[in-house]
Each structure stands twice: as C-alpha cells, then as structure tokens.
Amino acid sequence: MLVLLDISMPVMGGIDFLAAYQPEPPTPPMQVVVLTSSVHPRDLARLQELPHIGLLQKP
C-alpha cells in the first residue's frame, strides 16, 4: 500500500495521521511518502520521528 500525504490537509494533517495510524495485524506494511511545501523546522523535525519512506518538497 502506498500513501501520499501532505502536511497541511483539512481536518487531519499528514503529521497527525502518521502519529495516529495504528494498523491492525496482519495489515500489509504501509509505504508513506510525504509531499509538502512546508520548510518549517518544527514540521521537518516532527517528520523525522514518524514512519515514512520519503519526503518531496513542493514549490
């Protein structure tokens, strides 16, 4: 499963989603790529603590 997340989304942002997501076994592994225009150090530091396989900066 591939999930593309943006840090800034309505209702629940990408960081909130990653922090809350608790898969039920035997769920297949989730591959997450974060797409963001944020360059805020707080956002980037928080992402380092959460599971994701890539970060793509949007213009």
Image (cartoon, grey):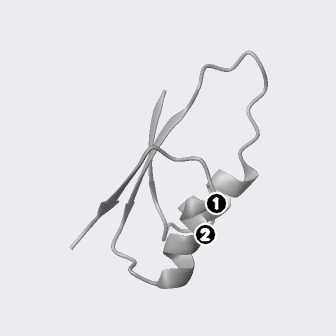
Quadrant housing residue 29: top right
Q: Which residue is mark 2?
A: 46
Name the kind of residue labelled 2 in the image. Arg
Residue that sits furthest to the left in the current view:
59
Residue 6, position in %: x, y?
Answer: 44, 61
Residue 58, position in %: x, y?
Answer: 26, 67
Separation (CA) of disc 2 from disc 1: 5 Å
Residue 37, position in %: x, y?
Answer: 33, 74
Residue at disc 1, secondary structure:
loop
- Please name the residue shown 21% across and 73% down the image: 59
Q: Which residue is mark 1?
A: 49
Q: Is residue 23 above or below residue 15?
A: above
- Please name the residue shown 45% across and 84% down the image: 40
Q: Mark 2 packing: few (<14 Cα in 10 Å), some, or many (20+)? A: few
Q: Tell whether 19 sits left or right of 38.
A: right
**Is label 2 in contact with label 1 (beta carbons under 8 Å)?**
yes
Q: Tell whether 47 sits left or right of 34.
A: right
- Please name the residue shown 49% across and 26% down the image: 1
Residue 48, position in %: x, y?
Answer: 56, 61
Counting every numbered tag in the picture gives 2
Task: Residue 59: give its label.
Answer: none
Residue that sits furthest to the top in the current view:
26
Residue at disc 2, secondary structure:
helix
Q: Tell whether 4 sits left or right of 20.
A: left
- Please name the residue shown 64% across and 52% down the image: 18
Q: Is residue 25 above or below residue 31?
A: above
Q: Mark 1 packing: few (<14 Cα in 10 Å), some, or many (20+)? A: few
Name the kind of residue labelled 1 in the image. Glu
Q: Is residue 58 above or below residue 22?
A: below
